[in-house]
């Protein structure tokens, strides 16, 4: 019985973490998702405990029914919510409903398990509670660790939830049909066997169809043929659009063979086909558009080129694992070294091997002047600042400041460390989201609070990419930054000339708020 309590607790915590993770991936606000899921489930567990009092006369049968229902709802929860997000909408309402139902079923377990334990061996209530809660809490520990380190990386969210549901169903059947075979009548026992078997069949069928379901959902979500998708440790990565050559199927980096982008030697280049493939490419990271081939040249030119006017021998790119910012920096003569710090090795792998991406970044990640470091930018900067490293140009091509995973990268602490690795006359280029957003001006105030001076400019985005209406950029330096067009004859086709830069500065000034927001810090992110 204590083993059953251990297993049920582990399964219950996996369901909670699945809901939190899915909401964070789809909506990006992990704090809100965790708060909603955990508070609703804890409340629902109390409701479930009260409801379970009505079923303690036949605790074994009731427990089997509860575990079967929990296995079905919890196991299918990821597929149900993902399908709701893609086709139905009202995701938050569905999330609350699923969390409420799972919480009620989890809450009903403890009273029923306590009654069953007392039937096996009568003992003091305090001792019984201590034993049961010890098994429950240890099970929660195992489930909490198994989710991020075993289930998520090896099986993914959907399959991991389905497997957890199967374990739940088996645990309920074992308790009733092995430990308490005499409680249910023979007819009820047969029905319980059938119910458990039916739940396992439903979960197995769902597991077999998960691949087709995900492909259909992604097709509906992204609206274009998906030629590559995978779930890395950090995010969901999707590429749409054409590639000039189909990627070879390999299993490097631990990906399943059908999920690995092209690598190795490529056929001879066909410029027209390569250019068309590059223009149609879109990369989505965590469900959000990160690269649009149609306007990436304008974006990266606007981000990188103004910062290169001046000394630029050593360039640091924070983020930018796709190689596009590095490629833009390498256009400028005199760049001797580019260091790219990217947290997700799967993005770097794509930047090195995907045919359309390598066409766009001109194989920048294979250039001997480029060094790629796989690390969190915040942690890496801390070490670099202590080590006395200095860079002429720092390019922050990072997640949007409105996302939870990006907020620490727009704080006083982060910019303070960037300031320490800047050469005395160095420049920092930052993309801080749309210029009309509060987060953009919070980033500008935060930069100035670290002793840097700033110049803001905004560039209209290509409407065909379905992204933001504009990109907001900040150029920062110790002295007053000067926005000037690039001098290289190899400047990107999307580079801004002097007139375009004046317009960009004017657009940013028009959106400047009347009241400057406070700087952002780790303890008080804006």
Image (cartoon, grey):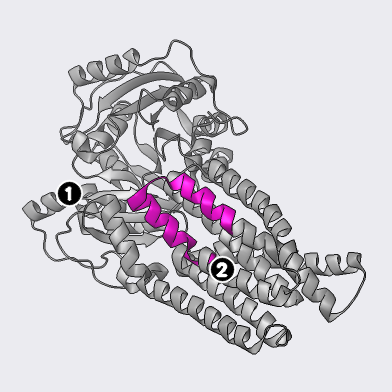
Q: Is residue 324 magenta?
A: no
Cα distance between the residues tagged 1 and 2 = 45 Å
Q: Which residue is mark 1?
A: 280
Residue occupying image coordinates x 40% and y 15%: 480
Image vertical order of residue 94 relative to residue 457, above or below? below
Q: Position of residue 118 (x, y in %)?
A: 84, 74
Q: Is residue 28 left or right of residue 188?
A: left
Q: Which residues are magenta?
A: 74-101
Badge nearest the viewer, 1 or 2 = 2
Residue 367: x and y in percent read 28, 52
Left or right, 144 with respect to 327, comes to right
Q: Mark 1 falls on what kind of element?
A: helix
* Name of the residue lying farthest toward the right: 124
Farthest-out residue, bottom: 186
Find numbered disc 2 in the image and state the secondary structure of the residue it sits on: helix
- Residue 164 place in picture, x, y as percent: 55, 70
Residue ID for mark 2: 69
Write the residue at 16% across / 46% down.
279
> Is 348 rendered above or below residue 459?
below
**Can residue 348 be seen in this snapshot?**
yes
Dividing the picture into quadrants, the one containing residue 444 is top left
Q: Earlier in the sequence, mark 1 or mark 2?
A: 2
Q: In which quadrant will I find the N terminus? A: bottom right
Q: Nearer the viewer, residue 471 or 310?
A: 471
Q: Is residue 319 above or below residue 2?
A: above
């Amino acid at each position: 019985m204590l083993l059953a309590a251990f297993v049920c607790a582990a399964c219950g915590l996996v369901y909670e973490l699945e809901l939190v993770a899915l909401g964070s991936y789809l909506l990006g606000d992990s704090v809100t998702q965790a708060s909603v899921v955990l508070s609703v489930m804890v409340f629902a567990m109390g409701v479930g405990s009260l409801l379970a009092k009505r079923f303690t006369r036949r605790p074994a049968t009731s427990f089997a029914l509860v575990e079967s229902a929990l296995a079905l709802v919890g196991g299918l929860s990821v597929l149900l919510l993902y399908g709701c997000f893609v086709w139905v909408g009202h995701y938050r309402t569905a999330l609350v409903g699923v969390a409420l139902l799972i919480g009620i079923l989890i809450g009903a377990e403890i009273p029923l398990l306590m009654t069953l334990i007392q039937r096996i061996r009568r003992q003091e209530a305090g001792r019984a509670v201590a034993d049961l809660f010890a098994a429950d809490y240890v099970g929660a520990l195992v489930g909490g660790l198994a989710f991020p380190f075993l289930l998520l990386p090896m099986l993914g969210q959907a399959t991991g939830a389905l497997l957890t549901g199967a374990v739940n169903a088996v645990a309920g059947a074992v308790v009733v049909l092995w430990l308490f075979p005499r409680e249910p009548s023979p007819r009820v026992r047969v029905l319980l066997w059938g119910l458990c078997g039916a739940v396992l069949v439903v979960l197995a069928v769902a597991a077999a169809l998960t691949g087709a379901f995900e492909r259909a959902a992604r097709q509906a979500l992204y609206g274009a043929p998906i030629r590559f998708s995978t779930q890395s440790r950090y995010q969901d990565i999707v590429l749409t659009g054409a590639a000039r050559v189909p990627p070879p199927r390999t299993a490097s980096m631990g990906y399943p063979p059908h999920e690995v982008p092209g690598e190795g030697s490529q056929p001879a280049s066909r410029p027209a086909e390569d250019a068309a493939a590059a223009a149609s490419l879109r990369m989505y990271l965590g469900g959000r558009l990160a690269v649009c081939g149609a306007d990436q040249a304008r974006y990266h030119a606007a981000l990188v080129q103004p910062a290169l006017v001046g000394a630029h021998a050593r360039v640091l790119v924070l983020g930018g694992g796709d190689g596009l910012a590095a490629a833009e920096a390498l256009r400028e003569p005199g760049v001797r070294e580019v260091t790219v710090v990217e947290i997700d090795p799967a993005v770097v792998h794509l930047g090195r091997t995907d045919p359309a991406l390598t066409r766009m970044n001109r194989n920048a990640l294979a250039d001997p002047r480029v060094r790629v470091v796989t690390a969190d930018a915040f942690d890496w900067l801390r070490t670099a600042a202590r080590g006395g490293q200095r860079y002429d140009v720092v390019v922050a091509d990072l997640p949007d400041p409105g996302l939870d995973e990006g907020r620490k990268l727009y704080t006083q602490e982060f910019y303070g460390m960037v300031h320490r690795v800047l050469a005395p006359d160095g420049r920092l280029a930052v993309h801080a989201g749309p210029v009309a957003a509060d987060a953009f001006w919070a980033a500008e105030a935060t930069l100035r609070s670290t002793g840097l001076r700033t110049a803001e400019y905004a560039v209209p985005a290509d409407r065909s990419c379905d992204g933001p209406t504009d990109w907001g950029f900040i150029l920062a330096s110790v002295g007053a930054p000067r926005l000037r067009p690039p001098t290289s004859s190899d400047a990107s086709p999307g580079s801004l000339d002097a007139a375009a830069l004046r317009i960009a500065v004017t657009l940013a000034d028009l959106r400047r708020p009347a009241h400057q927001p406070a700087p952002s810090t780790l303890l008080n992110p804006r």
